[in-house]
Image (cartoon, rainbow, N blue to C red):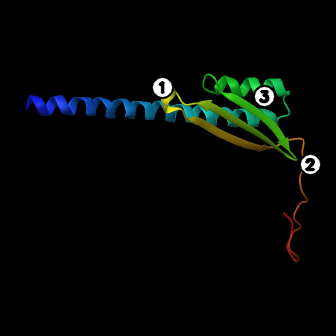
Amino acid sequence: MTAEAALAMPALVVFTLTLLWGIVAGAAQIQCVDAARAGARAAARSEPEQSVLATARASAPQGADVVLRRDGELWRVRVEAPAPGPASWAMTLRAEAVALAEDTPAGPVAAAPAGSVPN
């Protein structure tokens, strides 16, 4: 019985540590997603670029890189952060959010079908 326990304990410890690392990495991924969304919302409101970057970095995991760019009518915010844990498990977490700029003119309004009565 003692020999079996001696063999099972290291495997159980490794499994537990891997599970905990997965939970922490999942939480960091959620932080990346939240940071990208917060930055995209701030950019869509036409806030200054430094303010947008500060907003995104405030929600991002420590050591995250935040990139802001505009593609036509869309603002894109990308957040990349190293996954927490040992360097040997090197993994990069990424999230990107896109928002329509509020200073973009609205598209054409759809016409009512023929014969309909406006309210």
Residue holding disc 3: 52
1 or 3: tag closer to the N-terminus: 3
Residue holding disc 1: 86
The amino acid at mark 2 is Pro
- Find residue 77 and report its image quarter: top right
The amino acid at mark 1 is Pro
Mark 1, other Cα within 10 Å: few <14 / some 14–19 / many ≥20: few
SS class, disc 2: loop
Quadrant in the picture for the N terminus: top left
1 or 2: tag closer to the N-terminus: 1
Quadrant in the picture for the C terminus: bottom right
The image shows residue 77, relative to residue 57, as above or below, that is below
Please tell me which residue is depicted at 17% across the width and 28% down the height of the picture.
Answer: 6
SS class, disc 1: loop
- As rendered, which of 32 and 63 lies closer to the eye? 63
Please tell me which residue is depicted at 59% across the width and 36% down the height of the picture.
Answer: 93
SS class, disc 3: helix
Q: CA distance from mark 1 to mark 2?
A: 48 Å
- As rendered, which of 104 and 58 lies closer to the eye? 58
x, y (%) of residue 95? 65, 39
